[in-house]
Image (tube, grey):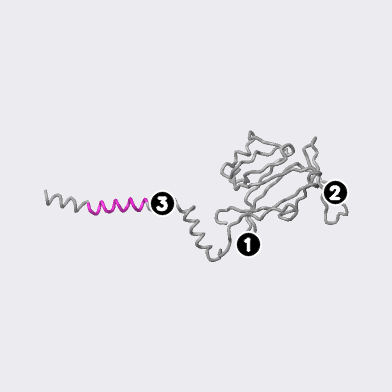
Amino acid sequence: SLSGEGNFNWRFIFPFDYIKAEDRIIYPIKGTFDIEPHMIKANCELTLQVWDADIITRDNFIGSLTMRLSSLPRCAKTAKSCGLHQLEPDCPRFSMFKNRTARGWWPVTDEEDEEIVVQGKVECQLEMLNSAEAESNPAGLGREEPNGLPKPDRPDASFMKFLGPLNTLRYLVKYRLKWILIKIFVIFLVCLIVFLFLYSFPGAIVQKMVNG
Protein backbone atom coordinates (compact mmCIF):
# COMPACT_ATOMS: atom_id res chain seq x y z
CA SER A 1 0.00 0.00 0.00
CA LEU A 2 1.05 3.63 -0.43
CA SER A 3 0.99 4.32 3.32
CA GLY A 4 2.81 1.12 4.28
CA GLU A 5 -0.23 -0.24 6.11
CA GLY A 6 -0.99 -3.94 5.71
CA ASN A 7 -4.01 -6.00 6.76
CA PHE A 8 -3.21 -9.57 7.69
CA ASN A 9 -5.89 -11.51 9.55
CA TRP A 10 -4.52 -15.01 10.10
CA ARG A 11 -4.57 -17.44 13.01
CA PHE A 12 -1.49 -19.35 14.11
CA ILE A 13 -1.71 -22.22 16.60
CA PHE A 14 1.36 -23.37 18.54
CA PRO A 15 0.88 -26.47 20.73
CA PHE A 16 3.50 -26.92 23.45
CA ASP A 17 4.07 -28.13 27.01
CA TYR A 18 5.22 -25.58 29.58
CA ILE A 19 7.81 -26.31 32.26
CA LYS A 20 7.03 -23.71 34.90
CA ALA A 21 10.08 -24.41 37.06
CA GLU A 22 12.42 -23.72 34.13
CA ASP A 23 10.19 -21.20 32.31
CA ARG A 24 10.74 -23.17 29.12
CA ILE A 25 8.57 -25.05 26.66
CA ILE A 26 8.71 -28.49 25.07
CA TYR A 27 7.26 -29.20 21.64
CA PRO A 28 7.49 -32.12 19.19
CA ILE A 29 9.37 -31.86 15.92
CA LYS A 30 9.76 -34.45 13.19
CA GLY A 31 12.57 -34.43 10.66
CA THR A 32 12.35 -35.57 7.06
CA PHE A 33 13.76 -39.03 7.76
CA ASP A 34 12.46 -39.42 11.33
CA ILE A 35 9.94 -42.16 12.02
CA GLU A 36 8.83 -40.68 15.33
CA PRO A 37 8.92 -37.01 16.37
CA HIS A 38 11.38 -36.02 19.05
CA MET A 39 10.90 -33.37 21.71
CA ILE A 40 12.67 -30.01 21.65
CA LYS A 41 13.15 -27.80 24.70
CA ALA A 42 13.32 -24.06 23.98
CA ASN A 43 12.91 -20.65 25.54
CA CYS A 44 9.32 -19.59 26.11
CA GLU A 45 9.38 -16.80 23.51
CA LEU A 46 7.24 -15.50 20.67
CA THR A 47 9.03 -13.90 17.72
CA LEU A 48 7.17 -11.65 15.28
CA GLN A 49 8.76 -10.61 11.98
CA VAL A 50 7.54 -8.14 9.36
CA TRP A 51 8.61 -8.47 5.72
CA ASP A 52 7.87 -6.44 2.62
CA ALA A 53 6.61 -8.83 -0.07
CA ASP A 54 8.08 -7.75 -3.41
CA ILE A 55 6.77 -9.19 -6.66
CA ILE A 56 9.96 -8.80 -8.70
CA THR A 57 12.85 -8.72 -6.22
CA ARG A 58 13.25 -10.79 -3.09
CA ASP A 59 11.34 -9.86 0.05
CA ASN A 60 12.83 -7.16 2.28
CA PHE A 61 13.12 -7.58 6.03
CA ILE A 62 11.50 -4.69 7.92
CA GLY A 63 11.73 -5.52 11.61
CA SER A 64 11.15 -8.07 14.35
CA LEU A 65 10.13 -8.41 17.97
CA THR A 66 10.90 -11.23 20.40
CA MET A 67 8.79 -11.41 23.57
CA ARG A 68 9.06 -13.81 26.48
CA LEU A 69 5.59 -15.19 27.21
CA SER A 70 6.14 -15.05 30.95
CA SER A 71 7.21 -11.39 30.78
CA LEU A 72 5.58 -9.60 27.84
CA PRO A 73 5.85 -5.83 27.40
CA ARG A 74 2.47 -4.25 27.98
CA CYS A 75 0.74 -3.66 24.66
CA ALA A 76 -0.42 -0.21 23.56
CA LYS A 77 -4.11 0.46 22.99
CA THR A 78 -3.53 2.41 19.77
CA ALA A 79 -0.90 2.54 17.04
CA LYS A 80 -0.18 6.18 17.92
CA SER A 81 0.75 5.32 21.51
CA CYS A 82 2.91 2.37 20.42
CA GLY A 83 6.64 2.99 20.52
CA LEU A 84 10.11 2.02 21.62
CA HIS A 85 9.33 2.96 25.23
CA GLN A 86 7.35 -0.28 25.58
CA LEU A 87 10.58 -2.28 25.32
CA GLU A 88 12.43 -0.38 28.04
CA PRO A 89 13.54 -2.53 31.02
CA ASP A 90 11.33 -0.57 33.43
CA CYS A 91 8.25 -0.88 31.18
CA PRO A 92 5.28 -2.67 32.83
CA ARG A 93 5.10 -6.33 31.88
CA PHE A 94 2.71 -9.22 32.31
CA SER A 95 2.62 -13.00 31.98
CA MET A 96 0.49 -14.72 29.37
CA PHE A 97 0.23 -17.71 31.68
CA LYS A 98 -1.66 -15.53 34.17
CA ASN A 99 -3.53 -13.06 31.96
CA ARG A 100 -4.30 -15.70 29.29
CA THR A 101 -5.39 -13.07 26.72
CA ALA A 102 -3.89 -9.89 25.30
CA ARG A 103 -4.69 -7.61 22.39
CA GLY A 104 -2.94 -4.44 21.34
CA TRP A 105 0.01 -2.90 19.51
CA TRP A 106 3.70 -3.75 19.78
CA PRO A 107 6.64 -2.16 17.93
CA VAL A 108 8.89 -4.13 15.59
CA THR A 109 12.47 -2.91 15.51
CA ASP A 110 15.72 -3.17 13.61
CA GLU A 111 19.24 -1.85 14.07
CA GLU A 112 20.40 1.22 12.16
CA ASP A 113 23.81 2.80 12.79
CA GLU A 114 24.18 0.67 15.94
CA GLU A 115 20.88 2.00 17.31
CA ILE A 116 17.56 0.22 17.76
CA VAL A 117 14.81 2.02 15.83
CA VAL A 118 11.11 1.34 15.35
CA GLN A 119 10.45 0.07 11.82
CA GLY A 120 6.77 -0.72 12.19
CA LYS A 121 3.88 -1.51 14.51
CA VAL A 122 1.89 -4.72 14.73
CA GLU A 123 -1.54 -5.29 16.23
CA CYS A 124 -1.89 -8.79 17.64
CA GLN A 125 -4.37 -10.79 19.66
CA LEU A 126 -2.84 -13.50 21.83
CA GLU A 127 -4.75 -16.23 23.64
CA MET A 128 -3.40 -18.98 25.89
CA LEU A 129 -5.44 -22.18 26.33
CA ASN A 130 -4.79 -25.39 28.20
CA SER A 131 -5.37 -28.71 26.46
CA ALA A 132 -8.92 -29.15 27.82
CA GLU A 133 -9.96 -25.64 26.70
CA ALA A 134 -8.41 -26.14 23.26
CA GLU A 135 -10.32 -29.41 22.76
CA SER A 136 -13.65 -27.92 23.86
CA ASN A 137 -13.17 -24.78 21.72
CA PRO A 138 -11.47 -25.93 18.51
CA ALA A 139 -10.20 -23.34 16.04
CA GLY A 140 -8.92 -23.60 12.50
CA LEU A 141 -5.64 -22.35 11.12
CA GLY A 142 -5.62 -19.16 9.11
CA ARG A 143 -9.25 -18.28 8.45
CA GLU A 144 -10.48 -21.85 8.26
CA GLU A 145 -13.33 -23.31 10.27
CA PRO A 146 -14.14 -24.00 13.03
CA ASN A 147 -14.31 -20.53 14.54
CA GLY A 148 -12.97 -19.03 11.32
CA LEU A 149 -11.70 -15.47 11.26
CA PRO A 150 -13.29 -12.86 8.96
CA LYS A 151 -11.40 -11.54 5.97
CA PRO A 152 -9.37 -8.39 6.65
CA ASP A 153 -11.01 -5.06 5.88
CA ARG A 154 -8.82 -4.05 2.96
CA PRO A 155 -9.51 -1.13 0.60
CA ASP A 156 -11.27 -1.97 -2.63
CA ALA A 157 -8.72 -2.74 -5.33
CA SER A 158 -11.18 -2.33 -8.21
CA PHE A 159 -9.87 -0.20 -11.10
CA MET A 160 -6.55 0.01 -9.26
CA LYS A 161 -4.62 -0.31 -12.52
CA PHE A 162 -6.41 2.80 -13.81
CA LEU A 163 -6.38 4.83 -10.60
CA GLY A 164 -2.95 3.72 -9.39
CA PRO A 165 -0.98 6.71 -10.79
CA LEU A 166 -3.65 9.17 -9.59
CA ASN A 167 -3.70 7.64 -6.10
CA THR A 168 0.09 7.76 -5.96
CA LEU A 169 0.12 11.44 -6.96
CA ARG A 170 -2.62 12.26 -4.45
CA TYR A 171 -0.76 10.46 -1.67
CA LEU A 172 2.53 12.19 -2.48
CA VAL A 173 0.89 15.63 -2.52
CA LYS A 174 -1.13 15.01 0.64
CA TYR A 175 1.46 13.33 2.85
CA ARG A 176 4.93 13.63 1.34
CA LEU A 177 5.03 16.96 -0.54
CA LYS A 178 2.42 18.97 1.34
CA TRP A 179 4.77 21.10 3.45
CA ILE A 180 7.36 21.35 0.67
CA LEU A 181 4.74 22.82 -1.67
CA ILE A 182 3.55 25.20 1.05
CA LYS A 183 7.12 26.43 1.65
CA ILE A 184 7.69 26.90 -2.09
CA PHE A 185 4.46 28.89 -2.36
CA VAL A 186 5.38 31.12 0.60
CA ILE A 187 8.87 31.76 -0.81
CA PHE A 188 7.41 32.55 -4.23
CA LEU A 189 4.91 34.96 -2.66
CA VAL A 190 7.63 36.77 -0.69
CA CYS A 191 9.84 37.01 -3.78
CA LEU A 192 6.92 38.38 -5.81
CA ILE A 193 6.19 41.07 -3.20
CA VAL A 194 9.87 42.07 -3.07
CA PHE A 195 10.05 42.18 -6.89
CA LEU A 196 6.94 44.37 -7.17
CA PHE A 197 8.28 46.67 -4.48
CA LEU A 198 11.67 47.07 -6.18
CA TYR A 199 9.99 47.47 -9.58
CA SER A 200 7.68 50.26 -8.42
CA PHE A 201 10.08 51.94 -5.97
CA PRO A 202 12.13 54.01 -8.54
CA GLY A 203 8.96 55.22 -10.28
CA ALA A 204 7.49 56.30 -6.96
CA ILE A 205 10.65 58.32 -6.15
CA VAL A 206 10.64 60.04 -9.57
CA GLN A 207 6.94 60.84 -9.24
CA LYS A 208 7.53 62.33 -5.82
CA MET A 209 10.41 64.47 -7.12
CA VAL A 210 8.28 65.76 -10.03
CA ASN A 211 5.37 66.60 -7.80
CA GLY A 212 7.57 67.97 -5.11
Examine the structure image and report whether residue 198 is included in the region drawn in magenta: yes
The residue at which mark 3 appears reads as 182
* Residue at x 51% of width, y 59% of height: 168
In x, y percent, where is residue 28?
82, 48
Q: Residues within 10 Å of mark 3 (few under 14, many from 20)?
A: few
- Asked if 25 appears above or below 210 in the picture, the reply is above
Q: Which mark is residue 55?
A: 1
Labelled pair 2, 1 in contact (Cβ < 8 Å): no
* Residue at x 60% of width, y 41% of height: 84
Examine the structure image and report whether residue 15 is included in the region drawn in magenta: no
Earlier residue among tags 3 and 1: 1
User: What predominant SS class does the magenta segment belong to?
Assistant: helix
In x, y percent, where is residue 63?
63, 48
Assign the N terminus to one quadrant of the image: bottom right
- Asked if 17 appears above or below 149 in the picture, the reply is above
Mark 2 secondary-structure assignment:
strand
**Which callout, 3 or 1, points to the residue nearer the camera?**
3
Q: Is residue 80 left or right of residue 27?
A: left
Mark 3 secondary-structure assignment:
helix
In x, y percent, where is residue 130?
79, 42
Q: Is residue 46 left or right of residue 188?
A: right
In x, y percent, where is residue 93?
67, 36
Mark 1 secondary-structure assignment:
loop
The residue at which mark 2 appears reads as 38
- Asked if 71 appears above or below 194 in the picture, the reply is above
Q: How many marks?
A: 3
Q: Which residues are magenta?
A: 186-200
